[in-house]
Amino acid sequence: MAKCPTCGKEVAPKKSWKMAGRPDKAGKRTELTIGLCECCGKTFRTTLNKQKI
Ligand SMILES: [Zn+2]
């Protein structure tokens, strides 16, 4: 679930996918789970989860 930036309501993402983030100083990569949500007639992207891989 993600919070709508306009009304603050919790919305379920319509679509989600994984993306590799940039590596940190130690070279560890972060895998991000991005969600696409729709609320208030707008779509917005949000980070649902971050995971070190
Ligand atoms: Zn909303």
Image: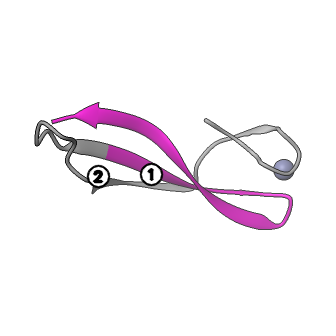
- Which quadrant would the N terminus be assigned to in this image? top right
Looking at the picture, which amino acid does disc 1 mark? Answer: Ile
Q: Nearer the viewer, residue 8 or 15?
A: 8
Question: Separation of disc 1 and disc 2 at Cα?
Answer: 11 Å
Q: Is mark 1 within 8 Å of ligand 1?
A: no
Q: Residue drawn at (69%, 65%), measured in percent from left and top?
A: 43
Q: Earlier in the sequence, mark 1 or mark 2?
A: 2
Q: Is residue 51 left or right of residue 27?
A: right
Q: Residue drawn at (31%, 52%), measured in percent from left and top?
A: 18
Disc 1 crowd rating (10 Å Cα; few below 14, some 14-19, many 20+) is some
Q: How many marks can you see? A: 2
Q: Inspect the magenta stretch and tell me whether residue 17 lies in it.
A: no
Q: Is residue 31 left or right of residue 33?
A: left
Which residue, as the protein is rendered here, is positioned at the far front?
25
Of tags 1 and 2, the one toward the viewer is: 2
Looking at the picture, which amino acid does disc 2 mark? Answer: Gly
Q: Inspect the magenta stretch and tell me whether residue 40 lies in it.
A: yes
Disc 1, disc 2: CB below 8 Å?
Answer: no
On the image, which quarter does residue 31 sit in? top left
Q: Position of residue 32 (x, y in %)?
A: 34, 46
Which SS class for mark 1?
A: strand
Q: Position of residue 41 (x, y in %)?
A: 83, 66
Q: Main secondary structure of the magenta part?
A: strand
Q: Is residue 31 left or right of residue 45?
A: left
**The label number, if any, that marks residue 45 in the structure image:** none
Which SS class for mark 2?
A: loop
Q: Give the residue number, with chain letter if any, for mark 2.
A: 21
Q: Nearer the viewer, residue 3 or 22?
A: 22
Instruction: Please provide the residue range marked out in magenta.
Output: 32-53
Q: Position of residue 10 (x, y in %)?
A: 74, 36
